[in-house]
Image (cartoon, grey):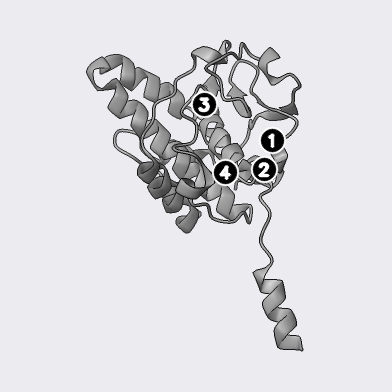
């Protein structure tokens, strides 16, 4: 009987909890965004037709806004972790380095923005793992690549960057962070992990 109970207990799925990811990010880094439910979501931060309809990060007021049903989404833990990855970059200097690098190398803009997204997904994996969130198979959790629309930036967020990098790249960098649980593995191309490591709370 005890064996049957143990098997049943172990088979119980872990429910995605975006707020656990928020708590983890705040424990690891300073200046993490406020998180606010908004209804209608489209009334916030200049959102519009190009903006993610579930959740987005407004850098103008350092707030992540989400719709009423967002916390019930099975993908919500990852989606929150992804936006917090952008927040880590913005609040701790990585986004400034990226912008300067992109400005000096406009012919490589797509490549460089792709590096930014890869690092974001790596940070997201670290946050998810440390928050005790289940791993995620991107191909089955989403209909195509997540966040192909505007999902972060200054107001109007509808004008924010959104560059697809492909499902395989999202999965690779999410898994990298998830398995290591350490932002030092999140260096990619010109964008190292030094600022991420320096920003960690001891």
Cα separation between marks 4 and 1? 12 Å
Cα separation between marks 3 and 4? 19 Å
Cα separation between marks 3 and 1? 23 Å
Q: Quadrant of residue 156?
A: top right
Does 53 sit left or right of 173 as displayed? right
Label 2 residue SS: helix
Cα separation between marks 2 and 1? 9 Å
Label 4 residue SS: helix
Q: Closer to the camera, 119 or 12? A: 12
Please state the horizontal and vertical placement of residue 52, each as a whole percent of the image: 57, 25
Label 3 residue SS: helix
Earlier-in-chain disc, 3 versus 1: 1
Earlier-in-chain disc, 4 versus 1: 1
Marks 3, 2: nearer the viewer = 2
Cα separation between marks 4 and 2? 8 Å
Please state the horizontal and vertical placement of residue 37, each as a whole percent of the image: 75, 28
Q: Residue furthest bottom?
A: 1
Earlier-in-chain disc, 2 versus 1: 2
- The image quadrant where one finds the N terminus is bottom right
Earlier-in-chain disc, 3 versus 4: 4
Label number found at residue 78: 4
Cα separation between marks 3 and 2? 20 Å
Marks 2/1 in contact by CB < 8 Å: the verdict is yes
Q: Would you name the residue on which mark 2 appears?
A: 18
Label number found at residue 90: 3
Q: Closer to the camera, 29 or 116? A: 116
Label 1 residue SS: helix
Label number found at residue 196: none
Disc 1 crowd rating (10 Å Cα; few below 14, some 14-19, many 20+) is some
- The residue at 55%/27% (across/down) is 91
Q: Closer to the camera, 177 or 96? A: 177
């Amino acid at each position: 009987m005890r064996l049957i109970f143990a098997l049943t207990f172990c088979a119980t799925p872990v429910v995605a909890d975006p707020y656990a990811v928020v708590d983890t990010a705040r424990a690891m880094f300073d200046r993490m965004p406020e998180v606010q439910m908004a209804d209608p979501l489209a009334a916030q931060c200049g959102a519009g037709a190009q903006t993610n309809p579930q959740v987005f990060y407004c850098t103008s007021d350092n707030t992540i806004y989400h719709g009423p049903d967002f916390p019930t989404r099975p993908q919500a833990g990852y989606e929150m972790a992804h936006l917090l990855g952008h927040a880590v970059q913005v609040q701790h200097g990585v986004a400034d380095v990226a912008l300067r690098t992109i400005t000096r190398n406009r012919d490589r803009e797509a490549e460089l923005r792709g590096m930014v997204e890869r690092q974001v997904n790596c940070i997201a994996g670290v946050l998810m793992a440390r928050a005790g969130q289940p791993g995620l198979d991107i191909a089955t959790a989403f209909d195509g690549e997540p966040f192909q629309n505007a999902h972060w930036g200054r107001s109007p967020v509808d004008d924010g960057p959104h560059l697809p990098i492909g499902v395989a790249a999202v999965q690779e960098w999410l898994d990298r962070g998830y398995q290591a649980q350490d932002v030092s593995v999140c260096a990619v191309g010109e964008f190292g992990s030094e600022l991420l490591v320096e920003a960690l709370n001891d």
